[in-house]
Image: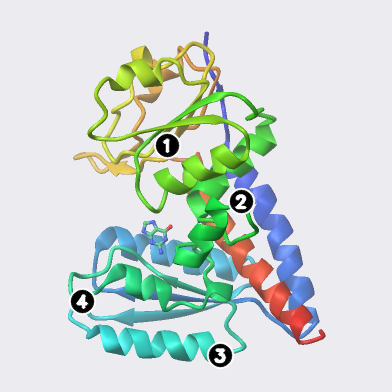
Amino acid sequence: MTARIIDGNALSARVRGEIAERATALTARGVQPCLAVILVGENPASAVYVRNKVSACEKAGIRSLRLDYPADVSPEVVMARLAELNADPSVHGILVQLPLPKQFDEAAVLEAISVTKDVDGFHAENVGRLSQNQEAFLPCTPHGVMKMFEAEGVDLAGVEAVVIGRSNIVGKPMAMLLTNAGATVTVCHSKTRDLNFHTRRADILVAAIGKPRFVTGDMVKPGATVIDVGINRLPDGKLCGDVDFESAKTVAGLITPVPGGVGPMTITMLLENTVISADRAARAAGK
Ligand code: GUN
Protein backbone atom coordinates (compact mmCIF):
# COMPACT_ATOMS: atom_id res chain seq x y z
CA MET A 1 0.00 0.00 0.00
CA THR A 2 1.15 3.54 -0.65
CA ALA A 3 -0.40 6.29 1.42
CA ARG A 4 -2.28 9.22 -0.06
CA ILE A 5 -0.29 12.38 0.61
CA ILE A 6 -1.97 15.39 2.21
CA ASP A 7 -0.85 18.50 0.32
CA GLY A 8 -0.45 21.21 2.97
CA ASN A 9 0.66 23.77 0.40
CA ALA A 10 -2.51 23.38 -1.68
CA LEU A 11 -4.85 23.48 1.33
CA SER A 12 -2.95 26.42 2.74
CA ALA A 13 -3.18 28.36 -0.53
CA ARG A 14 -6.95 27.79 -0.65
CA VAL A 15 -7.52 28.91 2.95
CA ARG A 16 -5.17 31.89 2.59
CA GLY A 17 -7.17 33.01 -0.46
CA GLU A 18 -10.33 33.10 1.69
CA ILE A 19 -8.47 34.93 4.47
CA ALA A 20 -7.20 37.55 2.00
CA GLU A 21 -10.79 38.19 0.84
CA ARG A 22 -11.91 38.69 4.44
CA ALA A 23 -8.94 41.03 5.08
CA THR A 24 -9.85 43.09 2.01
CA ALA A 25 -13.49 43.36 3.12
CA LEU A 26 -12.43 44.43 6.63
CA THR A 27 -10.04 47.03 5.22
CA ALA A 28 -12.91 48.42 3.10
CA ARG A 29 -14.91 48.77 6.35
CA GLY A 30 -12.02 50.85 7.77
CA VAL A 31 -10.37 48.12 9.86
CA GLN A 32 -7.25 46.66 8.26
CA PRO A 33 -6.26 43.54 10.25
CA CYS A 34 -2.89 44.06 11.96
CA LEU A 35 -0.53 41.57 13.61
CA ALA A 36 2.35 42.65 15.89
CA VAL A 37 5.25 40.20 15.96
CA ILE A 38 7.92 40.43 18.67
CA LEU A 39 11.28 38.73 18.20
CA VAL A 40 13.91 38.79 20.96
CA GLY A 41 17.47 37.78 20.12
CA GLU A 42 19.00 36.12 17.08
CA ASN A 43 17.84 32.48 17.15
CA PRO A 44 18.20 31.64 13.42
CA ALA A 45 15.13 29.36 13.29
CA SER A 46 12.99 31.99 15.04
CA ALA A 47 14.22 34.66 12.62
CA VAL A 48 13.11 32.50 9.67
CA TYR A 49 9.69 31.82 11.24
CA VAL A 50 9.14 35.52 11.96
CA ARG A 51 10.19 36.53 8.44
CA ASN A 52 7.75 33.99 6.99
CA LYS A 53 4.92 35.21 9.23
CA VAL A 54 5.47 38.87 8.28
CA SER A 55 5.69 38.02 4.58
CA ALA A 56 2.50 35.89 4.74
CA CYS A 57 0.66 38.83 6.37
CA GLU A 58 1.73 41.13 3.55
CA LYS A 59 0.49 38.71 0.88
CA ALA A 60 -2.90 38.36 2.63
CA GLY A 61 -3.45 42.13 2.98
CA ILE A 62 -2.78 42.04 6.74
CA ARG A 63 -0.65 44.83 8.18
CA SER A 64 2.26 43.64 10.33
CA LEU A 65 4.36 45.39 12.93
CA ARG A 66 7.69 43.68 13.44
CA LEU A 67 9.43 44.53 16.71
CA ASP A 68 12.99 43.25 17.20
CA TYR A 69 14.90 43.36 20.47
CA PRO A 70 18.49 42.35 21.32
CA ALA A 71 18.96 39.07 23.25
CA ASP A 72 19.95 40.96 26.44
CA VAL A 73 16.90 43.26 26.51
CA SER A 74 15.32 43.70 29.92
CA PRO A 75 11.95 41.92 30.27
CA GLU A 76 10.42 45.20 31.56
CA VAL A 77 11.03 46.83 28.16
CA VAL A 78 9.16 44.06 26.35
CA MET A 79 6.37 44.02 28.96
CA ALA A 80 5.90 47.80 28.55
CA ARG A 81 5.67 47.38 24.77
CA LEU A 82 3.10 44.62 25.20
CA ALA A 83 0.98 46.94 27.36
CA GLU A 84 1.08 49.57 24.57
CA LEU A 85 0.12 47.01 21.92
CA ASN A 86 -2.73 45.71 24.11
CA ALA A 87 -4.10 49.26 24.36
CA ASP A 88 -3.66 50.09 20.65
CA PRO A 89 -7.01 49.61 18.87
CA SER A 90 -5.32 49.34 15.46
CA VAL A 91 -3.50 46.13 16.56
CA HIS A 92 -5.62 42.95 16.50
CA GLY A 93 -3.08 40.20 17.09
CA ILE A 94 0.09 40.03 19.19
CA LEU A 95 2.66 37.26 18.95
CA VAL A 96 5.88 36.80 20.92
CA GLN A 97 8.11 34.33 19.12
CA LEU A 98 9.32 31.52 21.39
CA PRO A 99 11.72 30.51 22.82
CA LEU A 100 12.71 33.64 24.77
CA PRO A 101 16.16 34.25 26.32
CA LYS A 102 16.59 32.94 29.86
CA GLN A 103 16.05 36.27 31.69
CA PHE A 104 12.37 36.00 30.65
CA ASP A 105 9.57 34.23 32.50
CA GLU A 106 7.85 32.85 29.39
CA ALA A 107 4.50 32.16 31.08
CA ALA A 108 4.39 35.72 32.47
CA VAL A 109 5.07 37.16 29.01
CA LEU A 110 2.33 35.06 27.41
CA GLU A 111 -0.13 36.12 30.09
CA ALA A 112 0.76 39.78 29.55
CA ILE A 113 -0.77 39.56 26.07
CA SER A 114 -4.44 40.56 26.02
CA VAL A 115 -6.61 37.42 25.78
CA THR A 116 -8.54 39.10 22.94
CA LYS A 117 -5.32 39.60 20.90
CA ASP A 118 -3.67 36.25 21.76
CA VAL A 119 -3.68 34.91 18.19
CA ASP A 120 -1.14 32.19 19.11
CA GLY A 121 -3.62 30.81 21.67
CA PHE A 122 -0.92 30.43 24.34
CA HIS A 123 -2.46 32.62 27.08
CA ALA A 124 -3.51 30.52 30.11
CA GLU A 125 -7.10 31.71 29.71
CA ASN A 126 -7.30 30.57 26.10
CA VAL A 127 -5.66 27.25 27.04
CA GLY A 128 -8.25 26.83 29.81
CA ARG A 129 -11.10 27.67 27.45
CA LEU A 130 -9.81 25.08 24.96
CA SER A 131 -9.62 22.46 27.72
CA GLN A 132 -13.28 23.18 28.53
CA ASN A 133 -14.22 23.00 24.84
CA GLN A 134 -15.29 26.64 24.84
CA GLU A 135 -14.64 29.08 22.01
CA ALA A 136 -11.02 30.28 22.17
CA PHE A 137 -8.10 31.30 19.98
CA LEU A 138 -6.62 27.91 19.11
CA PRO A 139 -2.84 27.30 18.90
CA CYS A 140 -1.95 27.52 15.22
CA THR A 141 -0.15 24.22 14.56
CA PRO A 142 -2.71 21.83 16.11
CA HIS A 143 -5.53 23.95 14.68
CA GLY A 144 -3.92 23.58 11.24
CA VAL A 145 -3.81 19.80 11.72
CA MET A 146 -7.54 19.79 12.58
CA LYS A 147 -8.20 21.81 9.42
CA MET A 148 -6.36 19.09 7.45
CA PHE A 149 -8.54 16.36 9.00
CA GLU A 150 -11.64 18.35 8.05
CA ALA A 151 -10.44 18.96 4.47
CA GLU A 152 -9.54 15.27 4.02
CA GLY A 153 -12.79 14.01 5.57
CA VAL A 154 -10.97 12.15 8.35
CA ASP A 155 -13.56 10.99 10.88
CA LEU A 156 -12.35 11.54 14.45
CA ALA A 157 -15.25 10.26 16.54
CA GLY A 158 -14.25 7.11 18.41
CA VAL A 159 -10.86 6.65 16.72
CA GLU A 160 -7.66 5.82 18.58
CA ALA A 161 -5.39 8.86 18.36
CA VAL A 162 -1.81 8.85 19.62
CA VAL A 163 0.14 12.10 19.99
CA ILE A 164 3.89 11.81 20.50
CA GLY A 165 5.09 14.93 22.33
CA ARG A 166 3.63 16.87 25.24
CA SER A 167 4.70 20.45 24.53
CA ASN A 168 2.44 23.40 25.33
CA ILE A 169 2.72 24.56 21.69
CA VAL A 170 1.71 21.32 19.93
CA GLY A 171 1.33 18.06 21.89
CA LYS A 172 -0.99 19.14 24.71
CA PRO A 173 -3.35 21.36 22.66
CA MET A 174 -3.39 18.70 19.89
CA ALA A 175 -4.53 16.12 22.46
CA MET A 176 -7.25 18.49 23.72
CA LEU A 177 -8.56 19.24 20.21
CA LEU A 178 -8.68 15.52 19.36
CA THR A 179 -10.43 14.79 22.66
CA ASN A 180 -12.99 17.54 21.98
CA ALA A 181 -13.57 15.99 18.55
CA GLY A 182 -14.42 12.61 20.11
CA ALA A 183 -11.18 10.67 19.62
CA THR A 184 -9.74 8.38 22.30
CA VAL A 185 -6.40 10.05 22.91
CA THR A 186 -3.08 8.81 24.26
CA VAL A 187 -0.21 11.25 24.80
CA CYS A 188 3.24 9.64 24.56
CA HIS A 189 6.58 11.30 25.39
CA SER A 190 10.20 10.64 26.26
CA LYS A 191 9.24 8.71 29.43
CA THR A 192 6.71 6.44 27.70
CA ARG A 193 7.69 2.80 28.31
CA ASP A 194 6.60 0.91 25.23
CA LEU A 195 6.12 3.55 22.58
CA ASN A 196 5.64 1.10 19.71
CA PHE A 197 2.79 -0.63 21.56
CA HIS A 198 0.91 2.68 21.51
CA THR A 199 1.82 3.86 18.01
CA ARG A 200 0.93 0.51 16.40
CA ARG A 201 -2.68 0.75 17.52
CA ALA A 202 -3.15 4.39 16.47
CA ASP A 203 -5.70 5.15 13.76
CA ILE A 204 -4.29 8.68 13.90
CA LEU A 205 -0.65 9.22 14.78
CA VAL A 206 0.66 12.75 15.35
CA ALA A 207 4.44 13.10 15.69
CA ALA A 208 5.67 16.25 17.46
CA ILE A 209 8.93 15.14 19.00
CA GLY A 210 11.70 17.14 17.35
CA LYS A 211 13.79 14.11 16.35
CA PRO A 212 14.53 13.53 12.67
CA ARG A 213 12.82 10.44 11.12
CA PHE A 214 12.04 9.04 14.59
CA VAL A 215 8.77 7.33 13.60
CA THR A 216 9.46 4.45 11.22
CA GLY A 217 7.08 2.35 9.14
CA ASP A 218 7.15 -0.58 11.60
CA MET A 219 5.64 1.73 14.26
CA VAL A 220 2.61 2.57 12.09
CA LYS A 221 -0.72 0.71 11.98
CA PRO A 222 -1.62 -0.27 8.40
CA GLY A 223 -3.95 2.34 6.91
CA ALA A 224 -3.37 4.90 9.70
CA THR A 225 -3.35 8.67 9.19
CA VAL A 226 0.16 9.93 10.01
CA ILE A 227 0.68 13.64 10.75
CA ASP A 228 4.26 14.88 10.91
CA VAL A 229 4.66 18.13 12.85
CA GLY A 230 8.48 17.97 12.98
CA ILE A 231 10.75 20.35 11.11
CA ASN A 232 14.36 19.23 11.54
CA ARG A 233 17.39 20.46 9.66
CA LEU A 234 19.80 17.71 8.60
CA PRO A 235 23.59 18.22 8.44
CA ASP A 236 23.31 18.63 4.63
CA GLY A 237 20.91 21.57 5.16
CA LYS A 238 17.80 19.71 4.00
CA LEU A 239 14.59 19.67 6.04
CA CYS A 240 13.02 16.49 7.32
CA GLY A 241 10.19 15.62 9.68
CA ASP A 242 9.88 13.44 12.78
CA VAL A 243 8.54 10.65 10.56
CA ASP A 244 10.63 8.50 8.25
CA PHE A 245 8.45 9.32 5.27
CA GLU A 246 9.79 6.64 2.92
CA SER A 247 9.04 3.70 5.23
CA ALA A 248 5.88 5.17 6.82
CA LYS A 249 4.19 5.91 3.50
CA THR A 250 4.26 2.21 2.56
CA VAL A 251 2.13 1.39 5.64
CA ALA A 252 -0.03 4.47 6.29
CA GLY A 253 -3.30 5.29 4.51
CA LEU A 254 -2.83 9.07 4.63
CA ILE A 255 0.36 10.98 5.44
CA THR A 256 1.74 14.53 5.53
CA PRO A 257 5.13 15.28 3.94
CA VAL A 258 7.87 17.60 5.26
CA PRO A 259 8.21 20.17 3.86
CA GLY A 260 4.79 20.97 2.38
CA GLY A 261 2.60 19.36 5.05
CA VAL A 262 1.70 20.86 8.43
CA GLY A 263 4.27 23.70 8.21
CA PRO A 264 2.34 26.03 5.86
CA MET A 265 -0.89 25.42 7.82
CA THR A 266 0.61 26.91 11.02
CA ILE A 267 1.03 30.36 9.48
CA THR A 268 -2.34 30.07 7.74
CA MET A 269 -4.12 29.60 11.06
CA LEU A 270 -2.22 32.56 12.52
CA LEU A 271 -3.53 34.73 9.68
CA GLU A 272 -7.05 33.38 10.24
CA ASN A 273 -6.92 34.17 13.98
CA THR A 274 -5.74 37.71 13.19
CA VAL A 275 -8.64 38.26 10.78
CA ILE A 276 -11.13 36.83 13.32
CA SER A 277 -9.78 39.22 15.95
CA ALA A 278 -10.00 42.20 13.55
CA ASP A 279 -13.56 41.23 12.63
CA ARG A 280 -14.55 41.20 16.33
CA ALA A 281 -12.92 44.63 16.80
CA ALA A 282 -14.77 46.01 13.75
CA ARG A 283 -18.13 44.73 15.05
CA ALA A 284 -17.45 46.12 18.52
CA ALA A 285 -16.73 49.51 16.92
CA GLY A 286 -20.01 49.30 14.97
CA LYS A 287 -18.20 49.09 11.58
N1 GUN B 1 7.95 28.86 18.48
C1 GUN B 1 7.73 27.69 17.85
N2 GUN B 1 6.47 27.63 17.38
C2 GUN B 1 5.88 28.80 17.72
C3 GUN B 1 4.58 29.33 17.51
O1 GUN B 1 3.68 28.71 16.90
N3 GUN B 1 4.37 30.57 18.01
C4 GUN B 1 5.32 31.26 18.69
N4 GUN B 1 5.00 32.46 19.16
N5 GUN B 1 6.52 30.79 18.91
C5 GUN B 1 6.80 29.56 18.42
Q: Which mark is first along the chain, 3 or 2?
A: 3
Number of numbered markers: 4
Residue 214 is situated, as x and y percent measured from the top left of the image, at 28, 28
Front one among 280 and 237: 280
Q: Which amino acid does label 4 sit on?
A: Ala
Task: Write down the residue under mark 2.
Answer: 133
- Residue at 50% x, 39% y: name it: 261
Q: Earlier in the sequence, mark 2 or mark 4?
A: 4
- Mark seen at residue 46: none
Q: Which of marks 1 and 2 is nearer the N terminus?
A: 2
Residue in the picture at 46% in, 77% down: 113
Give the number of the mark in front: 1 or 4: 4
Determine the residue positioned at 33% across, 64% down.
98
Is residue 17 placed above or below 217 in the rendered structure?
below
> Residue 85: horizontal and vertical position, in percent?
49, 86
Q: Tell us which disc is closer to us: 3 or 4.
A: 3
Instruction: Give the farthest residue toward the front.
Output: 132
Residue on which disc 1 sits: 258
Q: Indicate the amino acid at tag 3.
A: Asp
Q: Is mark 1 on a helix, strand or loop?
A: loop
Task: Say which mark, if any, is on residue 71.
Answer: 4
Residue mark closest to the camera, 3 vs 1: 3
Does the residue at mark 1 contact the one at mark 2 (Cβ under 8 Å)?
Answer: no
Do residues under tags 2 and 4 come within 8 Å of each other at their CB atoms? no
Specify the amino acid type for callout 1: Val
Q: In which quarter of the image is the C terminus?
A: bottom right
Which one is in front in this view, the residue at disc 2 or the one at disc 3? Answer: 2
Q: In this view, does 190 lie above or below 100?
A: above
The residue pinned by badge 3 equals 88
